[in-house]
Image (spheres, helix red, strand yellow):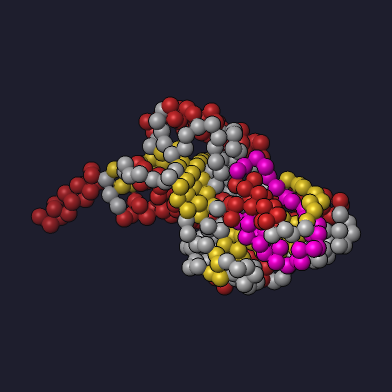
């Protein structure tokens, strides 16, 4: 009886000393493999904190969705969270648009509610921290590999599939183009299209085939992510346009399989998406405990080709050790960049 009483008192003591943090997690969508992986990493880290520390992390999850409706819905979700300021200790958000959340972010600043953004930045307010992939590096790695496949005096005919509404995808295009210029590689951008998720990717894939029906009219297609890029590869494969090389970004398992099978995609600068989620939750937890955190974290991306397949640990994996790149004089940099 005495033992039971002592055990009960111990459990009661734990329950009264444990502090609960409520976190509102505003996700973009669950239609893209990388975004699912980011959420998985964030919630995984929250469970680890709850299990291994004297703190409880309770997550209230919201999913916005894609397109204009998704951006509008995320604004509404953000304001809804702010309505009851006492019900939330921290907001972690993957923005659907760089500028759409200016209003709610500024309100959160006034209410002194910390906001951590991951993957995409928010303009016009103060973020407690911003965690994302090294997106410029992702574009640069693609550019280095594509440039290695062509003589400098050959003009590469390139199509860019972009999404200029968020910082991450803008930086990817900049890294790709800057690298070709630095290498003094001749190239010509013969078309630009917009796609970031499967439905827009299917439309763009059909449009590219309509605009460039002849074999040899396109050398390289650079897609800013696998969400929009994979349907384009499927359309090219169906049309037997195997002469086109696709360079992309994300690390979706289906895209990695395309590289392994020699199916049009030749390089994928893969994100460690779950790590972005884990780092976002950890930064938020550290801030709530009163610790100093970095204002910006850049998680490296990994250049997956047939030559480096065995070194890639997957979207959900941890960062590999330093890897030599057979097509480059430099090795892959696996360090997380912390900007104060």
Q: Is residue 311 left or right of residue 234?
A: left
Q: Is residue 135 in view? A: yes
Q: Position of residue 44 (x, y in %)?
A: 43, 54
Q: Quadrant of residue 139?
A: bottom right
Q: Give 41 or 331, whichever is nearer the viewer.
A: 331
**Label total for image:** 0
Q: Give 4 or 92, whichever is nearer the viewer.
A: 92
Q: Give 232 or 59, whichever is nearer the viewer.
A: 232
- Outermost residue, left direction? 2
Q: Which residues are magenta?
A: 138-167
Work out which quarter of the rendered image holds the N terminus and state it: bottom left
Does the magenta segment cover residue 29?
A: no
Give the vertical position of 57 relative to 75 (above or below): below
Q: Is residue 293 left or right of residue 224?
A: left
Q: Is residue 281 left or right of residue 51?
A: right
Q: Position of residue 152 (x, y in %)?
A: 76, 63
- Residue occupying image coordinates x 67% and y 42%: 164
Give the vertical position of 266 relative to 41 (above or below): below
Q: Position of residue 246 (x, y in %)?
A: 73, 60
Q: Position of residue 102 (x, y in %)?
A: 55, 31
Work out which quarter of the rendered image holds the C terminus and state it: top left
- Residue occupying image coordinates x 60% and y 68%: 329
- Residue occupying image coordinates x 50% and y 68%: 322
Q: Is residue 227 in view? A: no
- Residue occupying image coordinates x 83% and y 61%: 239
């Amino acid at each position: 009886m005495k033992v039971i009483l002592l055990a009960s008192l111990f459990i009661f003591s734990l329950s009264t000393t444990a502090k609960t943090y409520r976190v509102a997690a505003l996700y973009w969508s669950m239609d893209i493999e990388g975004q699912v992986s980011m959420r998985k990493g964030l919630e995984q880290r929250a469970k680890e904190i709850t299990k291994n520390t004297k703190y409880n992390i309770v997550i209230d999850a919201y999913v916005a969705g894609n397109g204009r409706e998704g951006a509008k819905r995320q604004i509404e979700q953000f304001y809804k969270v702010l309505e009851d300021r006492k019900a939330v200790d921290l907001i972690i958000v993957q923005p659907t648009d760089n500028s759409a959340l200016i209003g709610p972010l500024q309100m959160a600043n006034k209410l002194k509610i910390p906001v951590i953004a991951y993957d995409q930045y928010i303009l016009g307010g103060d973020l407690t921290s911003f965690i994302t992939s090294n997106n410029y590096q992702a574009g640069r790695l693609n550019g280095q590999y594509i440039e290695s496949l062509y003589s400098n005096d050959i003009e590469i005919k390139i199509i860019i599939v972009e999404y200029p509404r968020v910082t991450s995808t803008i930086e990817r295009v900049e890294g790709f183009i800057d690298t070709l210029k630095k290498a003094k590689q001749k190239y010509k951008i013969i078309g630009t299209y917009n796609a970031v998720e499967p439905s827009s990717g299917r439309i763009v894939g059909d449009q590219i085939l309509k605009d460039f029906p002849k074999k040899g009219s396109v050398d390289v297609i650079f897609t800013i992510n696998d969400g929009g890029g994979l349907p384009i590869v499927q359309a090219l494969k169906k049309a037997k346009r195997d002469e086109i090389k696709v360079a992309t970004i994300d690390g979706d398992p289906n895209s990695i399989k395309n590289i392994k099978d020699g199916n049009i995609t030749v390089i994928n600068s893969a994100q460690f998406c779950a790590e972005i989620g884990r780092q976002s939750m950890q930064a938020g937890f550290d801030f709530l405990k009163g610790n100093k955190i970095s204002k910006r974290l850049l998680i490296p991306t990994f250049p997956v080709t047939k030559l480096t397949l065995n070194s890639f640990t997957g979207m959900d994996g941890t960062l590999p050790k330093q890897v030599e790149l057979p097509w480059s004089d430099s090795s892959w940099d696996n360090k997380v960049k912390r900007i104060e």
